[in-house]
Amino acid sequence: MMRVALGIESSCDETAAAVVREDGTILSSLIYSQIEIHKPFGGVVPEVAARNHLEKIDELVKQALQQAQMSGDQLDLIVSTAGPGLIGGLMVGVTYGRFFAAGLKKPWYGVNHLEGHALTARLTDRVSYPYILLLVSGGHSQVLWVEGLGQYKRLGTTLDDAAGECFDKSAKILGLGYPGGPAIENAAQTGDAQRFKFPHPLVGQKNCNFSFSGLKTAVRQQVLAMMNQNMQFGHTEHNENTALSLQDRADVAASLQSAIAAVMVDRTRQALQEYATHASALVVAGGVAANTLIRTALTKLAGEYSLPLIAPPLRLCGDNAAMIAWAGLERFISGHGPEDDGAPRPRWPLDPTAKLPSGLSERYAK
């Protein structure tokens, strides 16, 4: 009899529940997005997010079980994201999962959200260990060497803003809305990626670290310069928030997206040069992995080292509960057990032995 897990995800602004079987079959996967709630603020408001998780989680779990045509008694395991993330949201998911499991007399695991992303390629493509992982999202930009379950060596991390954060903040500067990644990609479709020569931070350096704060600043400076110029010459085709023409915004978006893709390729190449001969694949995961240009550039890069690029289907790039259920299943089946007591942890690095780059604050030890 194949074992089945219920996964619960509530680390940021998506409330999610999923039922997954050990053969990788996703029996149900539901996500309630809070994008419309947080859009007026241009980003996630932690207290609002936690309140919405609390309102939605019970109904989502019931719907996930119904869609999977299962009762709680048929589950073998309940899994919640225990970190890293916003503490209020984590507390909702952990508390609900614990009580739900206790009521059913089933085991409960609190797992690392980043491990969920790291293992998604094994859920969808049965990727064998070891592999190189590029994990890129709103809060994380990391390159990791994945040797096995619970065995993660961090090769590089962000020195400031993550790639997704750069997308979000740049989209806000451009008046394109939230979330920024899809908004930038959509605007870039009609833009000229060669018009603006934005910086490519850290490109060429012999490490796998990332830095996107300077790129975001360059976007802001360019936008301010164009706003001043457009108003000076009386251009009327503009967005009420930015006073930029539609083509200006498209060109900035395309140039920014191109710069981020170039940085991703260069930083990942550093890892491939050392680890490619021992790796089964190059894996990309996280919300930014949904970007088509970045996927295309990484596919070409992986091919240079005779490796496949494994990227999740778009529905599993962002935060979801299927990856959480799967991470719990891998631990449960292998006999690893929970990593600790499962208490909510806003900071939880995959590689606890990794040292921060010189001068980097604990804020980035995610």
Image: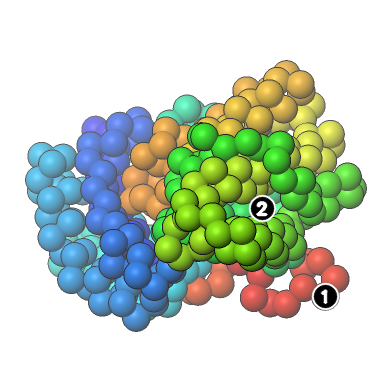
Residue 364, picture quadrant: bottom right
Instruction: Give the label on residue 25, or none.
Output: none
Whole-percent x and y of residue 317? Answer: 45, 43
Residue depicted at 18% across the width and 71% down the height: 55
In the displayed structure, would residue 62 be above or below residue 274?
A: below
Q: Are marks 1 and 2 in contact (CB under 8 Å)?
A: no
Instruction: Give the label on residue 142, or none.
Output: 2
Q: Say what secondary structure mark 1 lies in.
A: loop
Whole-percent x and y of residue 298? Answer: 65, 31
Using the image as rendered, state which of residue 199 and residue 1 is in the foreground.
199
In the displayed structure, would residue 218 be above or below residue 22?
A: below
Crowding near the residue tagged with mark 2, few <14, some 14–19, many ≥20 C-alpha atoms within 10 Å: many
Which corner quadrant holds the N terminus?
Answer: top left
Residue depicted at 48% across the width and 28% down the height: 126
Residue 307, picture quadrant: top right
Using the image as rendered, state which of residue 347 and residue 111 is in the foreground.
347
Amino acid type at circle 1 is Gly
Which corner quadrant holds the C terminus?
Answer: bottom right
- Give the number of callouts: 2
- Report whether residue 180 is seen: no
Judge left or right: residue 31 versus residue 122: left
Judge left or right: residue 165 versus residue 154: left
**Measured Cα–Cα span from mark 1 to mark 2:** 18 Å
Judge left or right: residue 184 versus residue 199: left
Whole-percent x and y of residue 358? Answer: 85, 71
Crowding near the residue tagged with mark 1, few <14, some 14–19, many ≥20 C-alpha atoms within 10 Å: few
- Earlier sequence position, callout 1 versus callout 2: 2
Residue depicted at 31% across the width and 77% down the height: 48
Outermost residue to the bottom: 47
Whole-percent x and y of residue 175? Answer: 47, 60
- Residue at label 1? 359
Q: Say what secondary structure mark 2 lies in.
A: strand
